[in-house]
Image (cartoon, rainbow, N blue to C red):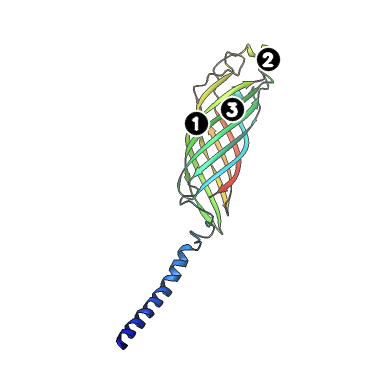
Amino acid sequence: MKSWFDRKSTLGVGILFGALGIAPVAQAQFEPVVRGRPGEQHIQTRIGMSIQGGGGVTGFTRTSENDVTNIGGSWEARAVFGTRTILALEAAYVGSSRSLNAGPGAGAGLMGNGAEGTFRLNAPFLVNETLIEPFGFAGLGWSRYTLRELNQLQSAFTTRTSDNVATIPLGGGIAFGYRGFIFEARFTYRPTFDNDLALTANGGQTRLDSWNAGAMVGFEF
């Protein structure tokens, strides 16, 4: 009888110590865990992602187009997949608005709307929990340009009031991130192809190659 009680006591002590050993492990599994280095606590994905929007200024790069248009405004919404990695992808909506200031179309507006995707090369650094990230990018895009507010006389100088063009966005910039907020400044050059929209008096084919300087703010997760 005594040996039975001894075995039972030993078993009970073993179960008690086993429970005490398992409890901290189980508790740790259910408690929130901070991952990554200081400054990365808000990152919910392994690569870092951001959604951001903003605006800037834009103009054409060729003299003939600049002679008949003003510097315009631009806006965009952009998603970045890989804010904390060297290689990243971007997807964006881009828009612009300019006015014609000379020639038969003076006073009309030129509106652009489009989309683009780019490959991005990052150089991410963490300095006192702040992300500092120079980057460069290249990709492909599409934009639709539309001449607006043309009167009947102005419409006579062009046979097209809208045009779809292919673009190649190229450029670079720098991003700053802190505790989930992100700010970015970039410069973009966009060569275009398949331009059929006439902006000049001679009706010749217009090259809509453009530059854009802008800034964006958003959230990183």
The residue tagged 1 is 141
Q: Secondary structure at mark 1?
A: strand
Q: Quick one: 62 or 169, which is closer to the camera?
A: 169
User: Could you tell me how far apart the alpha carbons at marks 3 and 2 are, in whole angstroms?
Assistant: 20 Å
Q: What amino acid does circle 1 point to? A: Gly
Residue 198 x/y as whole percent: 58, 17
Nearest to N terminus: mark 2 or mark 1: 1
Q: Position of residue 59 (x, y in %)?
A: 61, 30
Residue pointed to by mark 3: 112
What's the CA distance linking mark 2 and mark 1?
A: 31 Å
Instruction: Examine the image and state in which quarter residue 200 appears.
Output: top right
CB of mark 3 within 8 Å of CB of mark 2?
Answer: no
Of callouts 1 and 3, which one flags the residue occurring earlier in the amino acid sequence? 3
Residue 189 image label = none
Residue type at mark 2: give it.
Answer: Asn
Residue at 57 percent of width and 41 percent of height: 186
- Which of the 4 image quarters holds residue 61? top right
23 displayed left or right of 134: left
> Residue, x 64% and y 27% (percent of image)?
98
Where in the figure is residue 81, as x and y percent of width and height? 48, 44
Which residue corresponds to mark 2?
A: 151
Disc 2 to disc 1: CB gap under 8 Å: no
User: Of the residues under marks 3 and 2, which one precedes in the sequence?
Assistant: 3
Residue furthest out toward the right: 107
Alpha carbon distance from label 1 to label 3: 12 Å
